[in-house]
Amino acid sequence: MIHKLSHPNRFSALDLGLLATSFCLLRLPKMPELRGKEETLVNFKPAGPEVNIHAIAFKDKIREQARQKRLAAELAAGGKNAKQIKAEQRAAERARKEKERKVAERAKGRNPHKKKGRQAQIFDEWEDLAKEERLYKKMRKGKITKEQFDELMYGKKEQQQSDDDDEVSMVTET
């Protein structure tokens, strides 16, 4: 006998990502019902690498001991799951250390992002200036034309916009 739902809620109409988020899931379970349902999982955001899900213990001590044995057996076997578990644990440890380092930097009164951002901005400006200088030398030697210089320096869109502006001004003048 096949069981059929008698109420109007359909499984296919559920937003599974939102539902999983409302249940505070750290990641989705591997189940055949979720395969091919990526469009309904758009609203789900899994836990980041800063959360080591393998370190979360069961409240029940017997279940926790069984989980520890199963985890140790998987790691000892060295299969696909073991590699994934170890990679997740390393990522969680890296994220934890990075977060601690940033907190320590801020406690010392330093903002690690500010210096990197300013330094990166200076490097970008120097790279742009060097690019402009190289292109100008090529144009001066006759290797590229003024139009090619403008295209390489500013891109096609700005060149086309300036051409369109010139055409508009010619039309309004006549």
Image (cartoon, helix red, strand yellow):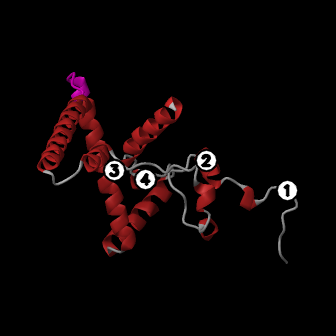
Q: Residues within 10 Å of mark 3 (few under 14, many from 20)?
A: some
Q: Earlier in the sequence, mark 1 or mark 4?
A: 1
Give how far apart the Cα atoms at labels 1 and 4 are. 36 Å
Instruction: State the image coordinates of residue 137 (x, y, percent, origin top left).
Output: 12, 46
Residue on which the image places disc 2: 23
Query: As rendered, which of 164 and 20 lies closer to the eye?
Result: 164
Q: Earlier in the sequence, mark 2 or mark 3?
A: 2
Q: Is residue 34 left or right of residue 74?
A: right
Instruction: State the image coordinates of residue 141 (x, y, percent, origin top left).
Output: 11, 49
Query: Where is the N terminus found, in terms of image quarters?
Result: bottom right
Query: As rendered, which of 140 and 136 lies closer to the eye?
Result: 140
Q: Is residue 125 left or right of residue 30?
A: left
Q: Are marks 4 and 2 in contact (CB under 8 Å)?
A: no
Q: As shown in the figure, which amino acid type bears the numbered disc 4?
A: Ile
Which segment is the magenta one? 105-111
Residue on which the image places disc 4: 53
Q: Quadrant of residue 153?
A: top left
Give how far apart the Cα atoms at labels 3 and 4 are. 9 Å
Q: As shown in the figure, which amino acid type bears the numbered disc 2?
A: Phe
Q: As shown in the figure, which amino acid type bears the numbered disc 1?
A: Pro
Label 4, secondary structure: give it: helix
Q: Are marks 1 and 3 in contact (CB under 8 Å)?
A: no
Label 2, secondary structure: give it: loop
Residue on which the image places disc 3: 92
Query: How many numbered marks are there?
Result: 4
Residue on which the image places disc 1: 8
